[in-house]
Image (tube, rainbow, N blue to C red):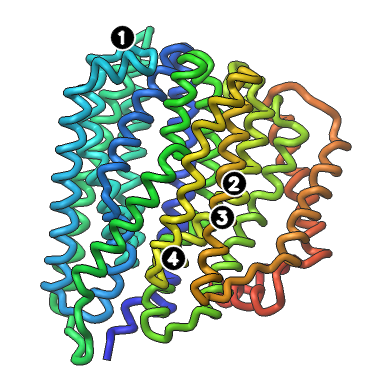
Amino acid sequence: MVNKHHYSLARLRRGLAHFGIGKIVNGALGFAILLLIARSLPAEDYGAYLILISAGQLLSAVALMGLNAVSISYVPRFRIGSGGPLLFRFIGSLVAARALLLLLSTTTMLLLAKPITAFFGVPGQVENVRLLAISMIAGGLATYFRIGVFEPLLQQGYAQAVWFARNVAFAGLLVFSLHLLTENPTVADVLIAEIGATVASLSVALVCLLAYWRKERRSYRTADDWEPPRLGAMIRTGLHDHVSFLMRLTGNQQAILLVSGRLLGPEATAAFGFVLTLVQQIKQYLPAEVLAPVIRPKLVAQFAIDQDFRLLNQRSTMLYKASLFVLGPVLAIFAIAGPEVLNFLSAGRYGDGATVMLVLLFMLIPASHNVILWGIMITVGRMDIFARGAVSSLLTVPLAIVLVGVFDNSISIAAAMLLATILYNLIVVRGLRAKGFEYKMDFRGLSMICVSAAVAAAVLLLVPQGTAGLFYATAATAVACVGFLTAAFVVKPFSAAERQLINKMARRNVFIW
């Protein structure tokens, strides 16, 4: 018999608790870091920093070679079936592969530093590429421990500790460097702070892994009826995910920022990058992103046992609805009070990006669905479908180039991202159904969320227009949220069974929508 207790409801609740606390704390720190950098660096330097960081993150992601998909899909299988030594040998081989790929990618980046910086319009940043390479290696390994090791093991306490160490160190070093050490902060100051943060994060990750090994090594027993996954199946999963990623590369946030730097220049990229980074911060706190790392290992383990696609579909659809439920009032706020809120957040620098912000927020609707579909493909072992859908992402950059050529603004890039994401999801859903998986969506519930968001926007119109200050931003947020929750309480986008399941997880009858 397999060891089901490793992904029991009690452990899932504990993981959710650790994840929730960590996500809130790390979210506040991450948001503070975003504002601190954007407010401290001049617009041109901030644009150059975004271009450098985007290049590093993109290269690091390319060097994953599908390892995240292999970890998420197979670490839970090893955990429910194998003994401790076999599980840890598997994890060790994945971490070693990640380290080797990072070394190869950073070496390539250092060799091509001059042509890369010249191509993206920041030739003065060649020396900073060396600093970026160091942070890429330490940060890439720390992130892999967090996402590829601790999350599939349902060890959210360790995963959040790794992220917390990075954010605390980064925020502290930024305050010291940008506000106490120098009067004229530079890109190099920020990158040095990031190196310190990534080294601290990696150190915590190694300590956590050692603690987990010492705690769990004697409690594992290999199930009599368990057979290790075949190497060929794991390689196919990784390759399909990597091919999908490569085809989606042109729609990636980092790639889009590089395109913006090339087409619009560093200064215009600063405004676009601030808005895009803010949207990505919001995306990270939608339930599809927040809960998926905790719930996905449970779904993978459960589907491996009972092969019930209908139940997988229901749980995934509920998670998608929860994301739109959180996104609804945010859309209402930026639709009505976008310029004021952005001016407040950026100290008056980037308020004219409100329209771009709204388009990118609409993009989060299909983007959240994309996260759900990726989780389903991982669970059912059909990453080939997801890889075929990624072809649509190849349209993002050509479409952005055409639209920028016509309209010459960053709205064109945001529109290209939105259209490509919608097409991507349509292709994947069609492919899923063609393979015999009866994937269904709750259109009634989704439409009720849209109605609630429209009501929130209408209510927000009644609030007197204010200046770009804390009071107006807070008032607009409160009014939009109250309006949305009131409307949603009336129309009930979630079914009675869904509300009961959510309340069961929370152990409180608090979800009434």
- Look at mark 4 in the image and give the residue it sits on: 377
- Look at mark 1 in the image and give the residue it sits on: 124
Q: CA distance from mark 3 to mark 2?
A: 12 Å
Q: Could you tell me which residue is drawn at 63 percent across and 41 percent down? A: 361
Q: Would you say the residues marked 2 and 4 are in contact, meaning their CB atoms lie under 8 Å apart?
A: no
Q: Could you tell me which residue is drawn at 74 percent across and 30 percent down? A: 472
Q: Nearer the viewer, mark 1 or mark 3?
A: 3
Please report whichever mark, 4 or 1, sits nearer to the chain's N-terminal start.
1
For mark 1, does the 10 Å Cα neighbourhood hold few (<14), some (14 to 19), or many (20 or more) residues? few
- Look at mark 2 in the image and give the residue it sits on: 364
Q: Position of residue 243 (x, y in %)?
A: 34, 51
Q: CA distance from mark 1 to mark 3?
A: 40 Å
- Look at mark 3 in the image and give the residue it sits on: 425
Please report whichever mark, 3 or 2, sits nearer to the chain's N-terminal start.
2
Q: CA distance from mark 3 to mark 4?
A: 12 Å
Q: Quadrant of the C terminus?
A: bottom right
Q: CA distance from mark 1 to mark 2?
A: 35 Å
Does residue 15 appear in the picture of this structure? Answer: no
